[in-house]
Amino acid sequence: MRRAVLLSAACVLAAWSIPAMAQVSDNVVKIGVATDMASLYSDINGQGAVVATQMAIDDFGGTVLGKKIELLTGDIQNKPDVAATLAGRWYDDEKVDVILGAGGSSSSIATENIAGEKKRVYLATDPASSDITGKLCNPYTVHWTYDTAALANGTGSAIVKAGGKTWFFLTADYAFGYALERDVSDVVKKSGGTVLGSVRAPLNTSDFSSYLLQAQGSKAQIIGLANAGGDTINSIKQAAEFGIVKGGQKLAGLLVFISDIHSLGLERAHGLRLTSAYYWDLNDKTRTFAKRFAQKFKGKMPTMVQAGFYSAALRYLQVVKEAGTDKAEAVMAKFKSEKWDDPVFGPSYIRVDGRNVHTMYLFEVKAPSESKGPWDYYKLLATIPGEEAFRPLDKGGCPLVAKK
């Protein structure tokens, strides 16, 4: 009788454990990394994003809820149609549970739209446009790393306070550039500054001469570079050739990554102010992650976006484990229900609009004489609490906020 009771109890316990296991669709958790593998943003995300995501999977143990974790990768080429096609195929045919990425803002917005239609999870680790958690928000998207509002409240605000009152923008001619110019312009005007004009340059431009000449001719104190990656690098290099900084105007790199500084060198880049969610030498946790990443990725320190891939993948797996399922609705509810201490971004939480809120930092690029060695590029000027860095919840126009 005793054996029968014990056997019965064991069967009950086993039965209780089955539903949690059965909640993993297709008996595997699939993570898709959709990013720029070869174009102008590949140093920002690219293969480094894949490495960072695999690190998160390995750190989690390679399984969740007893099921294998698989990683898929795809090159979206920073093209919205390519990103949308890839996202649709992954969600429908490949049964991908979550997509991380997806390159520039236009391709990321295309991915966000597909995620909303398919009701599947999308963690926007790459893009900048604050519209992702504004008018374009949906219940299945989290904007993970940074956005144009935080860049404006960091770099833009600091430069105006330091005396940069008149601005002219050199803007990337797509969704990211428009959002960045808009958000920084708003901060400049609210701070008592003036925007004298702007010019838009096509994405991945090799020759910025005509655009820089217009900026130079504006006589603005500050030329705001509302671009990123290779476009930022080329803008700064060619501005030096035109003697723009020597002539008294200053460049404001409104979205600058450590990979950009590494490419430019401190001789060209020193004095630039920038806002970032992550720097490898901030604290023991950031240094630990960065050194592990560098060992796996050609000795390079991670950009804030690559750190974002690690953070997002690791948190997603934790949430799936806690929720007991990879179903999108349960995962998103769990994401937004609690705060956590992120290993690279520190204390974090996700708002109803999908904005991941965490501390941002204002840095200045060191002079060559100040650097103590390879990748020692930044000095910290200010720590910006997440509530101050990111746009207030009720100011973005997200329909989810109105419903809430």
Image (cartoon, grey):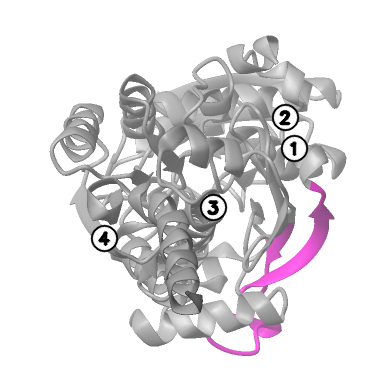
Residue type of the residue flagged with mark 2: Arg
Residue nearer the viewer, 53 or 81: 53
209 relative position to 3: left or right = left
Residue type of the residue flagged with mark 1: Asn
Which badge, 3 or 2, comes first in the chain's sequence?
A: 3
54 relative position to 312: left or right = left
Q: For mark 3, what is the residue?
A: 319
| Mark 1 → mark 2, Cα distance in angstroms | 9 Å
Which badge, 1 or 3, comes first in the chain's sequence?
A: 1
Q: For mark 2, what is the residue?
A: 391
| Mark 2 → mark 4, Cα distance in angstroms | 33 Å
- SS class, disc 4: strand
Vertical relation: 403 (above or below) 217: above
101 relative position to 163: left or right = left
Query: Which is in the foreground here, disc 1 or disc 4?
Result: 4
Residue type of the residue flagged with mark 3: Val
Which badge, 1 or 2, comes first in the chain's sequence?
A: 1
Picture quadrant where residue 156 is located: top right
348 relative position to 374: left or right = right
Q: Give the range drawn in magenta.
A: 362-385
| Mark 1 → mark 3, Cα distance in angstroms | 30 Å
